[in-house]
Every structure is written in C-alpha cells, then in structure tokens.
Image: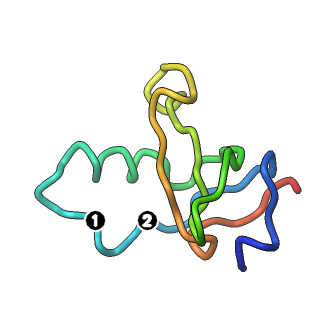
C-alpha cells in the first residue's frame, strides 16, 4: 500500500512496527508495541509516513502521543 491510497480520516490497524526502533529507548518501543493490532485514524502525512494520534492507548487524549509509520505497516479498516 502507498500513502497515496490513503486519506486523512481513514481508519487503519497497525500491523507492524518499524524494525529500526532503538532498543535502548524503552519508552518508544513500548509506545509502538502498545499500538500494534489497534486501530487509529490517519491524522496527517509527512512525505511517505502516516501520522497517527495514539494517546488513547495510554488513556490520554488521542493527540497526546503520536507515531509515524510507513503505509506498509498498517492495514486499512475503514476508508
């Protein structure tokens, strides 16, 4: 899948986390791992990355935490 196939507001499920996360940054790894398998709306695009607001994973406002993923790390649930 390419970012051009998606638009802001589409709901996607995180199916994969980046392989290059620094293992020494436990908070970042926990953030991405906590999002795996969950659904989020596409909030924005940054070149070939999707911006997802994921704060609700930690019972916080959705825009409190954000992650950026390549389109091949998600699956469209609702377009």
Q: Residues within 10 Å of mark 1 (few under 14, many from 20)?
A: few
State which quadrant residue 43 falls in.
top right
- Compared across the picture, whether 5 is left or right of 38 comes to right
- Is 77 displayed left or right of 69 in the figure? right
Q: Residue furthest bottom?
A: 1
Location of mark 2 (residue): 17
37 with respect to 17 (left or right): right
Question: Which label sits on residue 5?
Answer: none
Where is residue 57 shown, x and y percent of the image? 49, 33
The percent position of residue 47, horizontal first and vertical second, equals 59, 68
User: What residue sits 17% from the left and 52% below the top?
Assistant: 25
Q: Look at the picture and state if 22 lies above or below 9.
A: below
For the C terminus, the image quarter is bottom right
| Relative image position of residue 6 (x, y in whole percent) | 79, 64
For mark 1, what is the residue?
21
Q: Residue at x 56, y 54 (%)?
A: 37
SS for dot 2 = loop
Q: Residue at x 82, y 72 (%)?
A: 5
* Viewer-nearest residue: 59 or 47: 47
- Pointer 2: residues within 10 angstroms few (<14), some, or many (20+)? some
- Relative image position of residue 27 (x, y in whole percent): 23, 43
Above or below, comparing residue 39 to residue 12 in the picture: above
Image-quadrant location for residue 50: bottom right
Could you give the CA–CA distance between mark 2 and mark 1, rounded to whole angstroms?
A: 8 Å
Residue 13, placed above or below residue 64: below
Q: Residue furthest front?
A: 47
Residue at 49%, 48% in the rendered image:
35
Q: Nearer the viewer, mark 2 or mark 1?
A: 1
- What element does badge 1 sit on? loop
Callout 2–callout 1 Cβ contact below 8 Å:
yes
């Amino acid at each position: 899948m390419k970012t051009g196939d998606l638009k802001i507001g589409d709901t996607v499920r995180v199916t994969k986390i980046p392989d290059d996360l620094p293992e020494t940054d436990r908070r970042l790894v926990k953030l991405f791992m906590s999002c795996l398998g969950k659904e989020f709306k596409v909030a924005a695009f940054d070149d070939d990355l999707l911006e997802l607001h994921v704060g609700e994973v930690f019972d916080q406002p959705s825009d409190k935490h954000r992650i950026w993923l390549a389109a091949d790390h998600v699956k469209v649930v609702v377009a």
